[in-house]
Image (cartoon, grey):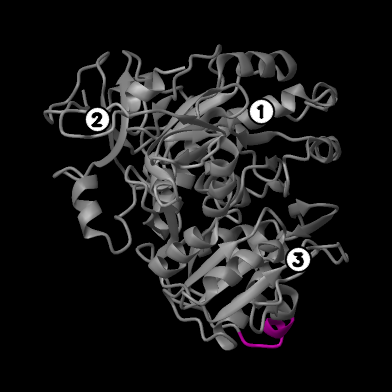
Amino acid sequence: MPRFWEQFYPENVPTKINTEAYETVVDMIETAMERYKDKTAFHSLSSSLTFGEVDKLSRDFAAFLQTKLNLKKGDRVAMMTPNLLAFPVAMMGVMRAGGVQVNINPLYTATELTHQLNDAGVEAIVIYGGSTATLVKALGDTSVKSVITVDMGDCTGEDIKSPEVDPGIPNPIRFMDALAEGAQSTFTHVELSRDDMIYLQYTAGTTGFAKGAVLRHRNLIANSEQFKAFAADALRPGKETVITALPLYHIFALTLNLLSYFSVGAKNVLIANPRDMGEFMETMKKHPFSVITGVNTLFGGMLQHPEFGKLDFSNYRVAIGGGAPVLSSTSEKWRKITGADILEGYGLSETSPILTLNPMGKQGFSGKVGMPLPETEIKLLRDDGTEAPRGEPGEVCARGPQVMSGYWNRDDANAESFTADGFFRTGDIGVFDDEGYLSIVDRKKDMILVSGFNVYPNEIEAAVAGFPGVFECAAVGVPDEKTGELVRLYIVKEDGADLTEDSVIEQCRDALAGYKVPRQVRFVDELPKSTVGKILRRELQKLD
């Protein structure tokens, strides 16, 4: 039967939901701003903002964008900051002004940043001061005209030491100055519809070349409502405290932690640097949490800290893992301390992101990614295009209100990425069991998952192939206890080349974001290839 998994939904999960509960995301957040105006919306470092304060500050920023930068509906604004109070304020200002947010990893290199800014046609960027040195290297090759810089203490009322803005940035605008100017300006309400764009979420897909997934207001509203229907026990209006350690530029945290929980009046505790586990634990002591999202490496790091077991779990409701498989051992340790397993889910940037989730209350850890959310269709296709029966693997193909309309200016990729009847091809291989639970048995061809981040071998290979002394190269993922996988690089040297593992890794640090840099380099006489000359990465993965 179609959507056969629906018969196995828990009693409190509906099969039908209102995916048009709001006309736009702006309507959704403004409703929450009014309803919960005196409650704490965000906490960062040692400061907080109420919903009412976020309302005013984001409106001020929207007015600044409109009156000082002449932002028009549909213009793209890049966001390149860690999880600080300025992020949600700026984000909500951009959407209220009718802009389209382009989310960018603050760790990107100049090459990666240049491509994304140019592909999206960005003319304004909100950027953390510590990332401006990278922007300086890219700026001259882009159309960016306005740079708004963010400090650690912005919106906190405190003077917190922050990295200096690179002096090469021409006429930088401090975020707090922008808010002050906006407060003296007139905000003009923008008529938006659910079909208007809200985010360009860049993803390498299966090719390694970054493409912008076009996400519209209707996609984010639908996915938020789908999640609320499936995890209602962890969405008590005005009562939840959410820990946001995953970066907000990632669609997982953006949709779940920020938008979904903002809409129900949750307090959101933003963690700017989760690698500082000591400070992270101190923050969690002060804010007994009910909800946390993460990847396996984050949960594992928390469990290893001696203070984690001493936290107050009296308010705890759920932990949701995504981005990379959650290990059974990690979930078991988590359950011993918190009383519940980590819930796994599955999704992609192109699907806003959630497609499947394990229901709350299910006992035991299955290693499966759950059931499709309400109003979501998933079919598994064999290579010949026929649908795989239950118990047999096939490519996960999805259709639903949360699925993107397509890639930005990439008709070629869109033609390849959708079936004739409108299902998005994820490239992942999955299996359904008889109770509607999906397992991911293989991942996108050759993709490497490092701490939940997608790393694509051909991107690494393209960079390394240009290094002096490299004849051929291939990158593969190998298991790693700390990061899930690490990048191992195989190189065939040119005759007489003087290359070492350290010299290659050092060059990679200049060309690639940190999580993409190979941790291991192996020099070989030749690479395994098919009869047509294609490098066989899977054969390399078998090597020690």
| Residue under label 2 | 379
Left or right: residue 167 versus residue 352 is: right
Q: Secondary structure at mark 3?
A: loop
Image disc number at residue 99: none
Q: Is residue 96 visible?
A: no
Residue indicated by mark 1? 299
Kindly identify which numbered label has been placed on residue 151. Answer: 3
Name the quarter where the N terminus is drawn: top left
Residue 71, horizontal then vertical, whole percent: 50, 81
Compared with 59, 417 (above or below) is: above
Q: CA distance from mark 2 to mark 3?
A: 46 Å
Magenta-colored span: 180-186
Query: Which numbered disc flags the more N-terminal residue, 2 or 1?
Result: 1
Q: Residue at x 51, y 77 (%)?
A: 140
- Identify the residue at horizontal 65%, vertical 18% (top origin): 340
Q: Residues within 10 Å of mark 1 (few under 14, many from 20)?
A: many
Q: Nearer the viewer, residue 498 or 62?
A: 498
Marks 1 and 3, the one that precedes in the sequence: 3
Amino acid on which disc 3 is placed:
Asp
